[in-house]
Image: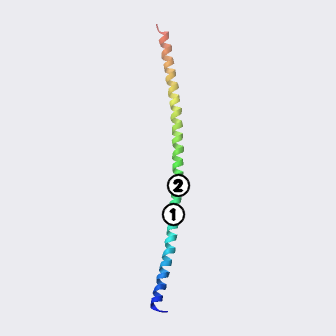
Amino acid sequence: MSTASKVVLGLSVVLTISTVAGVHIKQNWDRQRLHEGVLRDLERVERKRENLRLLEEQIQLTQELETERQRREASAASRATQSP
């Protein structure tokens, strides 16, 4: 085998190994990115649930405060009509 053919064979082997290694590294990177995307989606869903829970609490508190305000106004109006 001539020196030129040995060099070409060596370069071919190096390029082949480099290509295979590069593809595997990229696949692992893509897989990791996809997994991180799933984790971000789960966190986003959890934040959304928490926001909805807080909104429901705020609605309930607002209703309670409105009811209390109406009671106070009714009580004040009742006292105003009873006092001459």
The residue pinned by badge 2 equals 39
Closer to the eye: label 1 or 2: 1
Residue furthest top as drawn: 84
For the rendered model, the colour scheme is: rainbow
Residue 26, above or below 58: below
Spot occupied by residue 42 in the image (x, y as percentages of width and height): 54, 51
Query: What residue is pinned by disc 1?
Result: 30
Q: CA distance from mark 1 to mark 2?
A: 14 Å
Q: Which residue: 51% across, 42% down?
A: 51
Mark 1 or mark 2: name the one nearer the start of the chain: 1
Instruction: List x then y, in percent, for residue 26.
Output: 50, 67
Q: Residues within 10 Å of mark 1 (few under 14, many from 20)?
A: few
Mark 1 residue type: Asp
- For the point 53% across and 52% down, which residue is it? 41
Q: Secondary structure at mark 1?
A: helix
Q: Looking at the picture, which amino acid does disc 2 mark? A: Leu
Q: Position of residue 84 (x, y in %)?
A: 46, 7
Q: What label does residue 42 carry, if any?
A: none
Proximity of marks 1 and 2: CB atoms separated by less than 8 Å: no
Closer to the camera in the image, 65 or 55: 55
Q: Which residue is found at the position 52% from the left and 21% from the top?
A: 71
Within 10 angstroms of label 2, few (less than 14), some, or many (20 or more) residues?
Answer: few
Is the residue 65 above or below the residue 10 in the image? above
Residue 6 placed where, x, y %?
A: 47, 88
Count the marks: how many?
A: 2
**Helix, strand or loop at mark 2:** helix
Q: Residue furthest bottom?
A: 1
Indicate whether 9 appears above or below 55. below
Q: Residue at x 52, y 36 (%)?
A: 57
